[in-house]
Image (cartoon, rainbow, N blue to C red):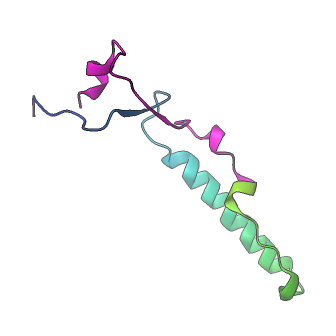
């Protein structure tokens, strides 16, 4: 595998490899708020379920998004290696 390389020049903005821990926490919070809303609701016709975007902030996730590298970047070949 000495010649393997990445085919798309898209990398994360930070050194975190994945967003999985942040997504796990956000989904646990959503499930807890959903259970509480169902438990304490008396009138199911007017029930407002919480949304994931209301309870979590994607900017607080570990990876903080992705960006596309330009070929003019001097570190381009380094990040294209696997």
**Residue 30 sits in which quadrant?**
bottom right
15 vs 78, left or right, is right
Q: Name the spot of residue 12 as percent of width and height, x first.
A: 45, 33
Q: Nearer the viewer, residue 59 or 22?
A: 59
Is the residue 74 above or below the residue 8 in the image?
above
The reply to whether the magenta stretch includes residue 65 is: yes
* Quarter that holds the N terminus: top left
72 vs 54, left or right, is left
**Residue 26 sits in which quadrant?**
bottom right
Find the residue positioned furthest to the left.
2
* Quarter that holds the C terminus: top left
The reply to whether the magenta stretch includes residue 62 is: yes
Q: Disc count in the image?
A: 0
Q: Residue at x 24, y 38 (%)?
A: 7
41 vs 13, left or right, is right
Q: Name the spot of residue 29 as percent of width and height, x first.
A: 68, 58
Q: Nearer the viewer, residue 18 or 32?
A: 18
Q: Residue at x 26, y 20 (%)?
A: 77
Per the rendered image, the range of residues in magenta is 55-82
Q: Residue at x 45, y 41 (%)?
A: 18
**Residue 68 sits in which quadrant?**
top left
Q: Name the spot of residue 28 as percent of width and height, x first.
A: 63, 60
Is the residue 36 above or below the residue 2 in the image?
below
Q: Name the spot of residue 6 as percent of width and height, x first.
A: 25, 35
Is the residue 75 above or below the residue 44 in the image?
above
Q: Nearer the viewer, residue 6 or 28?
A: 6
């Amino acid at each position: 595998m000495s010649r393997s390389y990445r085919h798309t020049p898209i990398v994360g903005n930070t050194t975190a490899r994945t967003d999985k821990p942040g997504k796990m926490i956000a989904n646990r919070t959503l499930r807890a708020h959903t259970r509480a809303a169902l438990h304490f609701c008396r009138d199911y016709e007017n029930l407002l379920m919480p949304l994931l975007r209301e309870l979590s902030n994607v900017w607080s996730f570990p990876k903080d998004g992705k960006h596309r590298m330009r070929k003019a970047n001097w570190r381009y070949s380094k990040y294209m290696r696997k």
